Image: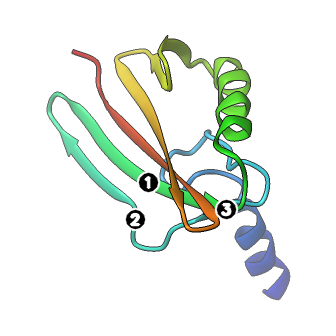
Amino acid sequence: LILIFFSFKVFSEEFVYGLGDVPIFKDMRSIEDSYILFDKVDGRYLYSEIKGEYEILEIQEYYKKVLPNLGWKLYEKNSFVRADEILEIKYFNDNKETKVVFTISPKK
């Protein structure tokens, strides 16, 4: 039972909470209570945040390289499209840490 719990904990921290296949950059961590999901007729609206002590440019380059391998195509700067959804990524300096905000919304 302990092994199962430990495996779940490790697996759950590998991806941005709620985004399923979007990996977390290095050892950044999800911000508790930041996840919001609205599933509407026109599509889903999702919000999730991670934070860690890394430079914004390093994180941006990572997602710019990784997301196309997951089916996301660059749409605009820090914005990607897949099927009928848009993934926007925003970066903020928060003291010594960088906060990364992910939002998914229907493509209009």
Nearer the N terminus, badge 3 or badge 2? 2
Indicate the position of residue 5 as horizontal and vertical percent values: 74, 80
Q: Secondary structure at mark 1?
A: strand
Q: Vertically, is 5 above or below 100?
A: below
Q: Residues within 10 Å of mark 2 (few under 14, many from 20)?
A: few
Q: Nearer the viewer, mark 3 or mark 1?
A: 3
Q: Answer yes or no: do the residues labelled 1 and 2 have beta carbons within 8 Å?
A: yes
> CA gap, disc 1 to disc 2?
5 Å
Q: Which residue is mark 1?
A: 48
Q: Which residue is mark 3?
A: 52
Name the residue at the left extreme.
Answer: 41
Residue 11's quadrant in the figure? bottom right
> CA gap, disc 3 to disc 1?
14 Å
Q: Vertically, is 6 above or below 107?
A: below
Please state if 79 lies on the left or on the right of 28 as rendered: left
> CA gap, disc 3 to disc 2?
15 Å
Q: Residue at x 85, y 80 (%)?
A: 3
Q: Secondary structure at mark 3?
A: strand
Q: Which residue is mark 2?
A: 34
Total label count? 3
Q: Nearer the viewer, mark 3 or mark 2?
A: 3
Disc 2 marks a residue whose amino acid type is Ser
Q: In terms of depth relative to the viewer, which is nearer, 97 or 44?
A: 97
